[in-house]
Amino acid sequence: MDIKRVPVTTLADGSFAQDIHVTGQVEAVFVSLGNLSTPDISITDLITAKVVLAKTGLATSKLYQTKTVVQKASDGTNLSDLDDVPVFGHLKVAIAGGGDKASGTIYIMVRG
């Protein structure tokens, strides 16, 4: 188990972006808003473009247990099962509308 800590400080336009190295499965994401002002947050795998987390207008710090739909190995059809989101090397953490030079922290729990 590994916790990736992403300190956030937005630019004057309220935006922030950072690529982080992650390999394994994302089990959870905790967003600590600090003084970020209702930001839109997205976390995406840069290799597969799989969205790990996308939330708009966050008003409070919150824990998210990220999951994805499991697919059949034989034909790729979706099952009703859910599992942690696999990540293949790099995640992009992006924030919009977070406020001028505001700060917070994003914690990403990774297994594997």
Image: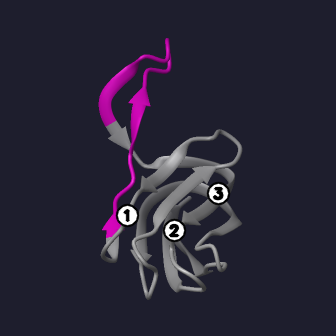
Mark pair 3, 1: CA separation: 21 Å
Mark 3 or 1 closer to N-term? 1
Which dot, 3 or 1, sits closer to the camera?
A: 1
Mark pair 2, 3: CA separation: 20 Å
Q: Residue 75 appears at what percent x and percent y?
A: 49, 12
Badge 1 is on which residue? 57
User: Does 75 sit left or right of 47 as displayed?
Assistant: left
SS category of the residue bearing label 3: strand
Q: Between residues 8 and 75, which one lies in front from this camera angle?
A: 8
For image coordinates 43% across by 49% down, the residue present is 84
Residue 68 sits inside the magenta stretch: yes
SS category of the residue bearing label 1: loop
- Answer with the quarter of the image where residue 18 lies: bottom right
Query: Within 10 angstroms of label 3, few (less than 14), some, or many (20 or more) residues?
Result: many
Q: Between residues 31 and 9, which one lies in front from this camera angle?
A: 9
Amino acid type, label 3: Leu
Q: Between residues 40 and 93, which one lies in front from this camera angle?
A: 40
Q: Give the range drawn in magenta.
A: 63-81
Badge 2 is on which residue? 97
